[in-house]
Amino acid sequence: MQQVFLQEVELEATYFSRFFTFNKKDWEKLSRKGKVSHAFIAHEPRTKLPENVISYINFGEKSLRTRVGKTCNMSMSSQSREKSKDFFGWYDLGEILHSPIYVPYYAQYMHRFTLANMPIVLDADFISFIPKSKTETLELKALLAYLNSNFNRFYIETHGRATGGGMLSIEVNQASKMPIINIKRLKKRQLKRLASLFDKLEEETRRIEGADSIDHLEKLQSIFDEIDIAISEFLGIKKELVKRIQNVVKILSERRISRTHKARPGTVKGEEEPKIRPPKKRGRRRKEEFHRPLTRWME
């Protein structure tokens, strides 16, 4: 029987996809900084819940309110769960599915496919991947090397949806159709080579403190090239074609990212200066918080 627990989670997509792995030290670092680091998951009927958990649920029904002023149990999603046979009540988020690989829906420079080295909860900013059969860590790392290669980037750049601001989005439908290598058919030495290249990529990414900028990605380019070469040798792809794929990915990426650069207002002027200028944006006021920390019910 599944136990009620508080699962560690960090909800900021930027840090979740900054590296190519996420581990407990990453979570501890975020927790020390005061980031949101716990999620409430209770996939059990009320009769089997501990008293402190029931107290927290009662708090959500009486005091804790949503942005529109309703108590938590009266929100649309909570009401839907209350009526569903798949949930034990409005508070229940459902069964937990363990996923070792995830990727953000949106990315500015590159979709980083990440290995989760600890149980984490992902929000709606990510797509998670669950293997259909038992997969060893060596196989997962080999697969991740491919997913972060220029072969897969070529698919994402050509099938993803580019936004007006230069971001690139990959939807579940597109992700489910990604052509990938069959890691079950690779030889042991091939798996080890790809896995070691993924480890090398992650180690260098940690050293330069992230792969979330153009400058950092350029520093990692030589490792991406090594991964591309290894894959091409396993699949019998000629080096000339690999170079063409790499160049196309670079061109498509640069063209998309160029949209992020806005023209300066004074660059092109008409015959008359504009008499009305847009008002300056004021900083947002910090809203008063009406909630209590989840950790209160952990004691």
Image (cartoon, rainbow, N blue to C red):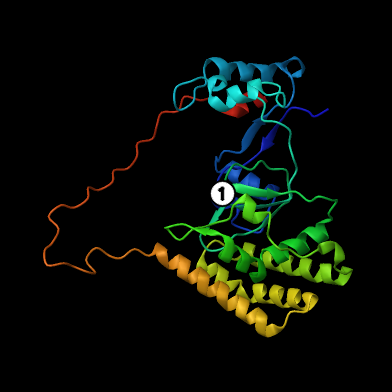
Question: Can you give x and y, in whole percent of width and height, for residue 11 in the image?
Answer: 58, 42
Residue at (74, 70) in percent of width and height: 197
Question: Can you give x and y, in whole percent of width and height, for residue 110 in the image?
Answer: 57, 63
Q: Is residue 199 left or right of residue 125?
A: right
Residue highlighted by disc 1: 13
Q: Quadrant of the C terminus?
A: top right
Count of all numbered marks drawn on residues in the image: 1
Of the pair 255 and 214, the residue shown nearer to us: 255
Q: Is residue 1 left or right of residue 73?
A: right
Of the pair 15 and 141, the residue shown nearer to us: 141
Reply above or below: 100 against 148. above
Mark 1: give few (<14), some (14-19) or many (20+) Cα within 10 Å: some
Q: Is residue 72 left or right of residue 276?
A: right
Reply above or below: 80 against 120. above
Report if residue 130 is visible in the image: yes
Of the pair 226 and 143, the residue shown nearer to us: 143
- For this orientation, the residue located farthest to the bottom is 240
- For this orientation, the residue located farthest to the right is 188
Residue at (56, 49) in percent of width and height: 13
Reply above or below: 242 against 198. below
Please state which amino acid type lies under the numbered disc 1. Ala
Q: Residue 67 falls in which quadrant of the image?
A: top left
Question: Can you give x and y, in whole percent of width and height, for residue 34 in the image?
Answer: 55, 40
SS at mark 1 in the image: helix
Q: Quadrant of the N terminus?
A: top right
Residue at (57, 20) in percent of width and height: 73
Q: Residue 68 falls in which quadrant of the image?
A: top left
Residue at (78, 28) in percent of width and height: 3
Report if residue 210 is visible in the image: no
